[in-house]
Amino acid sequence: MSVIDLRSDTVTRPTAAMRAAMAAAEVGDDVFGDDPTVNALQDRIATLLGKPAALFMPSGTQSNLCALMAHCGRGDEYIVGQHAHTYQYEAGGAAVLGSIQPQPIAHQADGTLALDDMAAAIKPDDAHFARSRLLALENTFGGRVMPMDWQRAATGLARQRGLACHLDGARLFNAAVAQAQATGSTPLAEARAIADLYDSVSVCFSKGLGAPVGSALVGPADVIARARRHRKILGGGLRQAGVLAAAALHALDHHVDRLADDHARARRLADGLAGLPGVAVVAPDTNIVFVDLNAAIDGAETVRRAGEHGLLLTGGQRLRLVTHLQVDEAGIDRAVAVLSALLGAGRRA
């Protein structure tokens, strides 16, 4: 039985063409700065996002942490959403390793942060308080595309108060593809427009873009220089990393526009599940579908039984289903059929 894996877009595997690019990669020692493929990737992503410099990282978690540590020092503070990945899902690294205090703010229903809440959270220059240094936002957030007008207002407020701005853009290109469809622009132009609002941006290659490993941090040269030192401290200095950078370059060349297919399949999945009894489906902006189960349905048992049918899911009473390059329309239809059998027609898992 083949498996339909909707747990995350991190489960993607390199395509045959990507593996060929990796095998052909020219390599060197990246800690010495002489891996030509890594250097080419860093130049490419920095230029694409309109920043002076970039640094290849093993993971998005490390990329975000290096950014926070590059912008903030001991006793400094960053403003962040209560459910943002950097705050909730990265093991408290900023506090544990950077001695940086997070100041979380509640999200609004659409995933944004209220500007008044942000303004109130920024501390005065007083020895009693941590020093507010950075605003860290996320786009997409839970698969939602954050409105450009709100991002402009939020980053503008931060800068008026003397804060730098960092974007966790793990799925930046998903946001850019969705935004391009709405504006009639191109995904690369939209990615640049989003990045222009921030001092630094972390972007992931190993989610929807389908590379096996890696993220990049882009930003000013001084920020990237500090981040490089932090990357070394954190054990992220790589040697012949060109084989990984080649996968990321291939992804930028071949896997950006096709994210629109993942978004269309997420809508197909949401439409197929809508109307099942005891189920509320959140319409997706991009490639993530949330399905809320009522209290009469055992979410953990649903996940277990779906696995028995070759459908891998995450969640409990809220299921999180993520489409990616290795889930085609037949896979979506099979996922709908499995969940319909488990949840539909009055059945309860």
Image (spheres, rainbow, N blue to C red):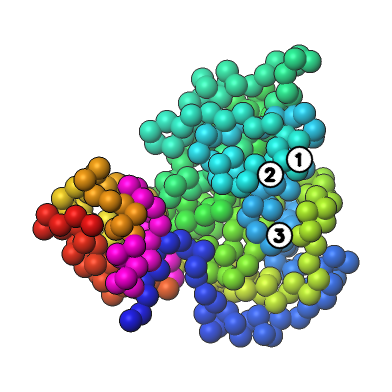
What amino acid type should be assigned to the residue bearing mark 2? Gly
Q: Which residue is mark 2?
A: 93
Q: Which residue is mark 1?
A: 98
What x and y, as percent, mark residue 169? Answer: 57, 50
| Separation of residues labelled 2 and 3 (CA atoms) | 16 Å
Q: Residues within 10 Å of mark 2 (few under 14, many from 20)?
A: many
**Of pointers 3 and 1, the one earlier in the residue sequence:** 3
Q: Residue at x 82, y 68 (%)?
A: 30
Determine whether label 2 and label 1 are within 8 Å by CB.
yes
Q: Residues within 10 Å of mark 1 (few under 14, many from 20)?
A: many
**Of pointers 2 and 1, the one earlier in the residue sequence:** 2
Q: Which residue is the extreme one toward the right? A: 32
Q: Nearer the viewer, residue 223 or 276?
A: 276
What segment is highlighted magenta in the picture?
304-325
What x and y, as percent, mark residue 135? Answer: 63, 33
What x and y, as percent, mark residue 186? Answer: 48, 58
What x and y, as percent, mark residue 305? Answer: 29, 64
What amino acid type should be assigned to the residue bearing mark 1? Gly
Q: Which residue is mark 3?
A: 57
What amino acid type should be assigned to the residue bearing mark 3? Met
| Separation of residues labelled 3 and 1 (CA atoms) | 17 Å
Q: Nearer the viewer, residue 137 or 232?
A: 232
**Disc 3, SS:** strand
